[in-house]
Amino acid sequence: MAISADNHGLRLVVRYAVLTLIAIIFIFPLVFMVMSSLKPDQQLLADTASLRAFLPVGDISLDNYWAAFKRAPVALFVMNSIIVTGVTVALSLFFCSTAAFAFVFINWRGRDVILSIILATLIVPFETIAIPLLLISSKLPWIGLDGVTFGWLNSYRVQIIPFIVDGLTIFLFVQFFKDLPSELIEAARVEGASWFQIYRRIVMPLSGPVLATAAILKFLVMYNQYLWPLMVVQEEGYRPVMVGLQYFFQLNRAWGEIMAYLSMITVPVLAFYLYLQKAFIASIASTGVKG
Amino acid sequence: MKHLTIATGALLASVAFTTLAQAQTTLSMWYHGAGNEGEATVLNQIITDFNASQGDWKVELQSFPQAAYNDSVVAGALAGNLPDILDVDGPVMPNWAWAGYMQPLQIDETKIANFLPGPRGMWDGKLYSIGLWDAAVSIVTRQSTLDELKLRTPTLDAPWTLEEFNGALEAAKASGKFEYAFDPGMAWTGEWYPYAFSPLLQSFGGDIVDRSTYKTAEGALNGDAAMAFGAWWQGLFTNGYAQATQDPADRDNGFAAGKYAFSWNGNWAALGALTAFDDTVFLPAPDFGAGAKIGAASWQFGVSAKSQHPNGASAFIEFALQDKYLADFANTTGLIPATASAAAMTDNYKEGGPLAVYYDMTNANALVRPVTPGYVVQAKVFEKALADIANGADVAATLDAATDEINADIEKNGGYGH
């Protein structure tokens, strides 16, 4: 009995040792980024040859952060990205889940064909449609405070609307909804619930894991947008963080400032992931979807 | 009564100012220098001065980060959303003019008669763009290195020959004091390759494309001279004089850290090199047989084809060509002012200034990259060929393949208007 307890304890120690090692390996780049952001360039480059790169040693200060704020409107870029990403994620969760709901629970003619077409868009890379999308976006009408105007360039909407609905997010919801007990839906129908009531009161409350997964995947895609905003945003006031990163790649690169900027723009991603982490892991465990 | 007079005066002044502001037509301008505080300061000053100097035009600036600028302009052109004034990298200008993104400048060309050749953006016999500065490349080293290795100090009149340059590399390697004898700057990909390395090919007598017709690269990129260049280029790496793959950090700080004896670098990095050692010297490009060559043409101002106010846009550009602004840019960025009179007004390029040698190098050795719309493709083909050769690819096969690729592109585009 005592031997068994020892074995169990040993296994536990080994398991935690391995997990700790893996965690350290994964966290090293982040630690390197943050530590480097605190060092002057000469020291930063010299430290890369040793473990000092991961330690807050030497001439430590926040100078790179102040310099980064001086070089570029960091707060504006982060705010733009949060607006674009946040609105897109929220709208995407709603529209993609309602679409998936219609595909899974409602019988209508052509349902399977339309779903197949939507899923087929998964194999079309964005780069192939970027130019046609640009040409369309540059001529679309919009009703705003100035009345009817044409052309969506230099706006939040041009960065949001084309990305609200996508095949992958609909697919995630469809797969998840298919696994929900059909008895629940049938019972609600018998009780006289409308489709929207079923969606809002029964399906959505059960969909926490897939909502978290879809939100995180969409968040990462939107937060990392580079090509599209580069094409459609010429005004600094609407630029997102990834285009802003280019402000730091001058001929003589200031590596410390780059690391400071990266540290600052990584914070929202980490916060969002940590907030949804539990549901995300539960979703992966139940659907096998990789993040 | 006194208060009433002051109030009336203020009101009249405000109305006059508002009327002036309303009378000014706005000119939009795109610039590649976002994130570069020094350039922004000078450019904003020029714009402020121009806007205040007359009542017809008001320039509004939109800055882009350099790495994203060309793609933004191309996307803007596709969407019909180009500004009135834009800046363009000199060798790219013919492509944008040919593609219909730009129109010729309406400025008095006598005003640029004293400009260095590089900043003048000529295409199809017309002036499409003009730069306030140029850039130059030199061999950066230390006088103490030259002395220890017992090397002759080359001059513009008597640059190192191929044998002397190779001898210098061998001496540096044999000394054992350096990680590598030569730092060509392999970490800087992109335009650096054709800008910095095609002059070496040209010094051998080859070129990226045949400039007599611009319709083929045959004989220029795969002739005897080009093959000799390719073999020499590969030898830099196989002989251990230089590294084919370089850490960007080494490019930035390797010379200052003593890793390299000689660094092939631009004048924009020269001030940093001067602060690294008190005996830093800038040597002219070697002459490999067909004359010493260095690249020319940096960023320049032009007018977009879409502009409804080309006269206003040209007026701004002409305004910006004043020596005082050329000098301001040079003092701020370290770049070479486009005129000798502006150079004399700068701290670095005036006679006896620490960087004056770069003005002389540009004047003596500058050669613009091929003036053709096809250059944007040819530059990428050239870059890949040189990277491949540096990494051990067969020289003849690589240059032949690059020649074929360039020729196919020229043919596909109907000769690019030549």
Image (cartoon, rainbow, N blue to C red):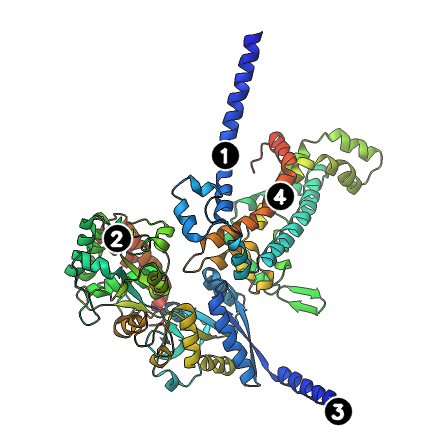
Chain where mark 2 sits: B
Residue B175: mark: none
The residue indicated by pointer 3 is: B2
Above-or-below relation of A276 to B177: above
The residue indicated by pointer 1 is: A24
The residue indicated by pointer 2 is: B398
The percent coordinates of residue A288 (x first, y second) are 58, 32
Q: Is residue B165 visible?
A: yes
Q: Amino acid at mark 3?
A: Lys
Q: CA distance from mark 4 to mark 3?
A: 62 Å
Q: CA distance from mark 2 to mark 1?
A: 44 Å
Give SS at disc 3: helix
Eye-nearest disc, 2 or 4: 4
Quadrant hosting residue A141: bottom right
The residue indicated by pointer 4 is: A271
Chain where mark 3 sits: B
Quadrant hosting residue B255: bottom left
